[in-house]
Image (cartoon, coloured by chain):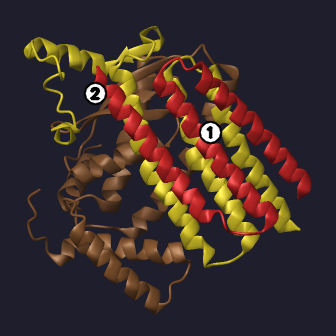
Amino acid sequence: MTAVAYVVGGILTAAAALALYRAVRGPSILDRVLALDVVLAIVGAALVLNMVVNRHLDNLILLVTISLVGFIGSVTVARFVTDRK
Amino acid sequence: MVNDVVVSVLLIGGALMSLAAGIGLVRFPDLLSRMHAATKPQVLGLLLLLLALAVENENWLLVPVLVLCWVFQLLTSPVSAHMVGRAGYRTRHLRRDLLTLDELDDVVARAAESHPPRPDRTGGTGREDDGGRA
Amino acid sequence: MNRRHIPLVTELPLVIWLVLVWGALWQDFSPGTLLFGAVIAYVVVNFFYLPPVELTGRFNVLWLVPFLGRFLFQLVTASVEVFWLAVTRGPRLRNAVVAVALRSHSDFLVTATGHAISLIPGSLVLEVDRSTSTLYLHCLNVRSAEDAEAVRRDVRATEAWLIRVMGSARDLAALRAEEARR
């Protein structure tokens, strides 16, 4: 199980690095929002990994909250981008 | 033992979805193509990871909260994807040379012809968010 | 904000959903929790007023199960396909914005179809035209008019499934008539 945890952690780290690269490069603010949305999803994945490996369930509510925060964030930014013209 | 194998496969599958999103974000050429890559860890990736959690715990009381977690994601991620995608299309964040056809552009052009001077919105196509804008 | 009185029956699905959310969040479905949840749900529904969602008044669980199976199958195949495209094709990609005219004019059903389509990687709703219930989709890897036609067929098939699950009786009759003609 520990070996699997290291493999999954490695994959998630690589994924987060790629998403952060896109967030830094942009070019537009929408690209950054999208990339940060993916980073949030990866953070959620890491929380699940933590729960599975350490056999607890404390992060579940955090998981729900993360999905809602990501939603509100990207909708707000998209709205500003559309209205700014 | 069997459980451990199933959990491992599900965890790796879920993590690979995140990796796919990362690769897609870096390699796809424009915003709207990248959006497709970003949907995956949020929907299938989360499903696989939550399944791993359920298999590992074997507790029926856990299932409703896991389903809730996934359903929230199902309800919210298309809405935010639509908002970002629409903002991207309207602010021209897509590469037209990559499109084989664009049927929305035809509609916008026709609408612009029939109602010429309305700078704020492209008349006639019945935007579904007009209520929110007032 | 014009607050007119909404009969309890139209609010009932929302209240039941909120009670289930409450129970799931506490991970406890004992009568006490559910009762307190029901009180909170009633207060929330009445104080935070939203226009009621107009459901179609039909819901068929027998069609829901195969629909979910089809949805999960599409989800998995489309995810793998997008993964494959990201690795092998990458920047050399051809997309399209496709207009799909739906059969139903119910807002609820158009929303549900758009949601189901957006959740599957490779297609994304850009705009909705409510007056003609047309969805404008951005689709990955569409290289020819035939591909676009395949997308259109697929979306209309998804809508047909949703009509079978929860479309209004009129939409269902129209769908049956269309199938009989074929």
**Letter of the chain that mark 1 sits on in the rendering:** A
Where does the image place residue C52, in percent across and percent down from the top left? 20, 62
Amino acid on which the number 2 mark rests in the picture: Asp
Q: Residue furthest right?
A: A3
Q: Colour of chain A?
A: red
Where does the image place residue B54, in percent across and percent down from the top left? 68, 68
**Letter of the chain that mark 2 sits on in the rendering:** A
Residue B59: image tag: none
Q: What secondary structure is found at the residue carrying circle 1?
A: helix
Where does the image place residue C2, in percent across and percent down from the top left? 8, 59
**Residue C140 in sight from this viewpoint:** no
Shown in brown, the chain is C
Where does the image place residue A3, in percent across and percent down from the top left? 91, 51
Dot 2 alpha-carbon crowd within 10 angstroms: few under 14, some 14 to 19, many 20 or more: few
Amino acid on which the number 1 mark rests in the picture: Val
Q: Colour of chain B?
A: yellow
Q: Residue at x 47, y 52 (%)?
A: A68
Q: Residue at x 38, y 38 (%)?
A: A76
Q: Can you identify the residue that label 1 sits on?
A: A39
Quadrant (top left/top right/bottom left/bottom right) for the N terminus of chain A: bottom right
Q: Residue furthest top?
A: B97
Q: Residue at x 45, y 75 (%)?
A: C22
Q: Is residue A8 left or right of residue B62?
A: right
Q: Residue at x 46, y 86 (%)?
A: C33
The span from disc 1 to disc 2 (Cα, nearest Å) is: 26 Å
Q: What secondary structure is found at the residue carrying circle 2?
A: helix
Quadrant (top left/top right/bottom left/bottom right) for the C terminus of chain A: top left
Q: Earlier in the sequence, mark 1 or mark 2?
A: 1
Q: Residue furthest bottom?
A: C31
Q: Is residue A11 left or right of residue B121?
A: right
Q: Can you identify the residue that label 2 sits on?
A: A83
Q: Is residue B126 above or below residue C160?
A: above
